[in-house]
Image (cartoon, grey):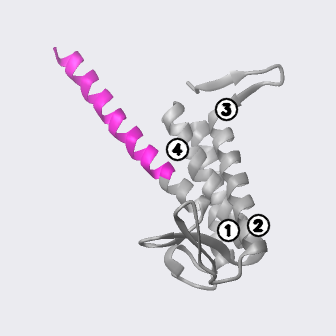
Amino acid sequence: MTYYIFQTKVGIIIIFYIIAIIVVIADQLTKVLIRTYIDIDQAFTIWGIPLTHIENSGMAGGLFPGNARLFGLIAVLFVVGVLYFRKTGDMKGALIDSSFGFFVGGAIGNGIDRLLYGQVTDFIIRRNGVLNIADHAIEIGALLLIMYGIISWFKKRALLTETES
């Protein structure tokens, strides 16, 4: 069963697509602003958040530099895989749809950069590196997936307990 936010005359808007679209728009908009107005390696702070502008031709943490196009292709395959799994898999519901929406939005956001520019624009300074909105969306997707797994485990455990009694 899929959970819906609201129904319109045009059709049903699914939470998965809303989240994915918002993530892609927010990611690409912030990257355009950074690329347009901030020089590479320029550091600055907005609302107490340290920012900079770097271009990464590899994957997370700068690993495997120069392989952005390969990782862009992997992002496309990942999105296709998620879409296929959503259609055929057993995991259903608002929480897992939200998780997949964040994953897909993040993969598309970074995939666009990799395929169009051969590198990803990162700008949010964190203790473990410099990230972007797409990276944070993927992290949120992972947290929601973990929550889904824990909740599912408890539900199955409760169901087993009920059937044993």
Of the residues tagged 3 and 2, which is closer to the observer? 2
> What residue is pinned by disc 2?
32
Q: In the image, which residues are magenta?
A: 140-165
Q: Is residue 76 visible?
A: no
Reply yes or no: does residue 112 show up in magenta: no
Q: Are marks 3 and 2 in contact (CB under 8 Å)?
A: no
User: Which quadrant: the N terminus?
Assistant: top right
Classify 10 Å Cα crowding around label 1: few (below 14), some (14-19), many (20 and above).
some
Magenta part, dominant SS: helix
The mark that comes first in sequence, 4 or 1, is: 1
Of the residues tagged 4 and 1, which is closer to the observer? 4
Dividing the picture into quadrants, the one containing residue 19 is top right
Compared with residue 61, is residue 93 higher up or lower down, i.e. above or below?
above
> What residue is pinned by disc 4?
99
The mark that comes first in sequence, 3 or 1, is: 3
The mark that comes first in sequence, 3 or 4, is: 3
Q: Secondary structure at mark 2?
A: helix
Q: Are marks 1 and 2 in contact (CB under 8 Å)?
A: no
| Amino acid bearing label 3 | Ile
| Amino acid bearing label 4 | Ser
Q: Secondary structure at mark 4?
A: helix
Of the residues tagged 1 and 2, which is closer to the observer? 2
> What residue is pinned by disc 3?
14
Query: What is the residue that sits farthest to the left in this orientation?
Result: 165
Q: Secondary structure at mark 3?
A: strand
Residue 100 place in picture, x, y as percent: 56, 45
Residue 155 place in picture, x, y as percent: 32, 27
> What residue is pinned by disc 1?
73
| Along the viewing direction, whichever of 141 and 51 lies nearer the viewer | 51
Residue 69 place in picture, x, y as percent: 69, 76
Residue drawn at the location 76% of the way across and 73% of the way down:
37
Q: Are marks 3 and 4 in contact (CB under 8 Å)?
A: no
